[in-house]
Amino acid sequence: MTRIATLDHRAVIAVTGEDRVSFLQGLVSQDVALAEPGRALWSALLTPQGKWLAEFFIIADGDRLLLDVEADQREDLIKRLSRFRLRAKVAVTADDYVVQAAWEGAAPDVADGLVAADARLPEAGFRILSRAGLPVTATLAEWDAHRLALGLPDGARDLEREKTVLLEAGFDELGGISWTKGCYMGQELTARTRYRGLLKRRLVPVAIEGAAPAPGTIILTAEGRDVGTMRSSAGALGLAVLRLDVLDGAETLLAGDARLVPRVPAWLKMPEPGARP
């Protein structure tokens, strides 16, 4: 049976007008021209310095583009995007769709909305946007456990505003960056990080032994070396930003009273031996 959970912390923005694709194309990390019905493309808005501001899914729906965003960021994101309209024939408005996630089964039928495959990973399932919401068969905590096991970040719970670099959070491997579409805001630092091999940390799943540490808890080795910070968690699973040199699990990692064990997902690309840190 397909698992369906309502994501109360997500909301929807509609981008309409004949310039909607070209308008977003120059602002976000994804190739907006690839947006199509039935496919949810992951993307981000960055600062001019290439640091994360917001993440969202882009779904084409007729003559509009729908953005599945964090509810707490929706009004700010509408204001930020609207500042760049200038003479573009585009409107950026809130929409009242309910956002849900579906996984472990076939795509559900939706009479009053749309279903789109989460393009990050096949196992991620589907995003559902509908007016009333489908009957739920799972809780938000169960969805969190599923996405955490896959290593999928969820907005500000896992990414730090004006600090996180996209490649630290898997946007490259998970298809959230286009390397061919041309310029967008923050593109220069994103490209430099990739081509110069500047990453020192990655956001990865961790198994938690003990009480789950609060987000932001500093992670230390047994010798007291600061090697990262805790992000979101659900039960005995979580995400943490960790230095590359501790991802092999050889060192004991402590966050508060809990012990953490890295669980590097198969999709994550580790640097080649001898590559520049």
Image (cartoon, grey):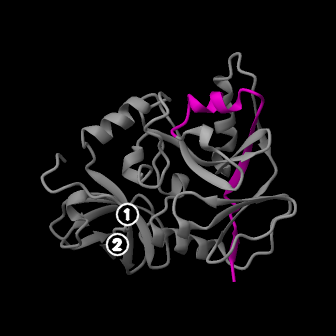
> CB of mark 2 within 8 Å of CB of mark 1?
yes
**Quarter of the figure that contains the N terminus:** bottom right
- Of residues 42 and 260, which is closer to you in this image? 42
> In the rendered structure, does residue 125 fall within the stretch colored magenta?
no
The picture places residue 89, in percent across and down from the top left corner, at 75, 22
Q: Residue furthest left?
A: 274
Crowding near pointer 1: few (<14 within 10 Å), some, many (20+)?
many
Q: Residue at x 26, y 65 (%)?
A: 247
In-image side of 227 versus 117 (left or right): left
Query: In terms of depth relative to the viewer, which is nearer, 93 or 75?
Result: 93
Mark 1 lies on a secondary structure that is strand
Q: Earlier in the sequence, mark 2 or mark 1?
A: 1
- Looking at the rendered structure, the kind of residue marked 2 is Arg
**Which type of secondary structure does the marked residue at label 2 adopt?**
loop
Magenta-colored stretch includes residue 16: yes
Q: Residue at x 28, y 71 (%)?
A: 254
Q: Is residue 97 visible?
A: yes
Q: Please state the extent of the stretch shown in magenta in the rendering.
A: 1-29
Does residue 252 sit above or below 91 in this rendering?
A: below
Q: Position of residue 224 (x, y in %)?
A: 18, 64
Q: Give the residue displayed 36% in from the left and 35% down from the top.
A: 191
| Residue 22 place in picture, x, y as percent | 64, 28
Residue position for label 2: 263
The residue type indicated by label 1 comes to Val
Residue 4 badge: none
The residue where tag 1 is placed is 204
Q: Quadrant of residue 188?
A: top left
134 versus 55 height, above or below: below
Q: Quadrant of residue 263?
A: bottom left
In this view, which residue lies farthest toward the bottom?
A: 1
**Can residue 80 be seen in this snapshot?**
no
